[in-house]
Structure formats: C-alpha cells, structure tokens
Amino acid sequence: MLRFSISLMGALLGISLVTGAVEGGNAKIETTRSERCAALSRQVDEALETHAAATQVTAAKALQRKGTRFCASKKEAQGVRMLANALKLLGVTPIDPDTVPKTDLHNKEKKP
C-alpha cells in the first residue's frame, strides 16, 4: 500500500509539473540570432526606401551587404551589429524583435 501511495504521489507530481509548464505559457520567447538578422535586414530595406536622401546611404548599403554576408555564414552576432550600424547611419533606431509581438514580425515578412 505504501508503494502504491508513493507511486501515485509521484504520478500526481509529474502531472502537476507538466500542467504548470503548460499554464505558465507567459514565459518570454527569445528571438534567435537568425530571426534578428532577418528582422534587421527588413528594417534596413525599409529605411533605405524611406531615407533615400540620407547622406550615409552608400555607407549604410555597404554595412547591410557585410551584415547579410555575416548572417549567411552563421556569424549572426557580427551580422546583427553591421545591420544595426547601417540603421544608425540612416538615423533609424534598430527594432528589438523581443519587444514586438511575433505575429507583427511575421506580418512584416509577408508584406509585398
């Protein structure tokens, strides 16, 4: 009887842990570096369209190309820095994808 009680308690504990993990779905989901590269690259594209007259457009495009190459070669941290610097040259603040809801990021991807 004691073994049954212990195994029952273990089963109940396991169920409560799983339920707690599912109910605790409010945890913040971090954006991966590759997602950050993609989001910043889109932001640079948009900034280049809206800030075409900026004096640093050529330098920003060069940084975007470097950043894209870094991101493609699995050096996302360097790519993110390059893309963020390109945005700063254009006078645009880089977005933080962790503060933007994931659905907004996905909607921007589908934008023509």
Image (spheres, rainbow, N blue to C red):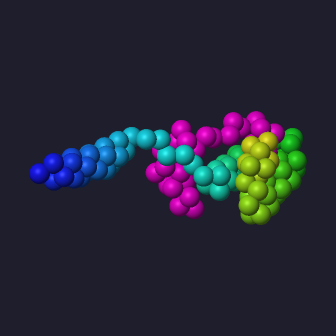
Magenta span includes 94: yes
Magenta span includes 99: yes
Q: Residue furthest left?
A: 1
Picture coordinates of residue 67, whole percent (x, y): 79, 54
Question: Quadrant of residue 92 in the image?
Answer: top right
Frontmost residue, 53 versus 94: 94
Quadrant of the snapshot with the C terminus: bottom right
Q: Is residue 7 left or right of residue 88?
A: left
Picture coordinates of residue 2, whole percent (x, y): 15, 48
Question: Which stretch is magenta?
Answer: 86-112
Q: Is residue 41 left or right of residue 99?
A: right
Name which residue lies at 74% across and 43% down: 84
Question: Quadrant of residue 109 in the image?
Answer: bottom right
* 101 over 93 or under it: above or below: below
Q: Is residue 8 left or right of residue 62?
A: left
On the question of residue 54 being in view, the answer is yes
Q: Is residue 43 left or right of residue 15?
A: right
On the question of residue 45 being in view, the answer is no
Q: Residue furthest front?
A: 2
Frontmost residue, 56 versus 70: 70
Picture coordinates of residue 22, whole percent (x, y): 32, 48
Name which residue lies at 54% across and 46% down: 30
Picture coordinates of residue 29, whole percent (x, y): 49, 46
Name which residue lies at 26% across and 46% down: 13
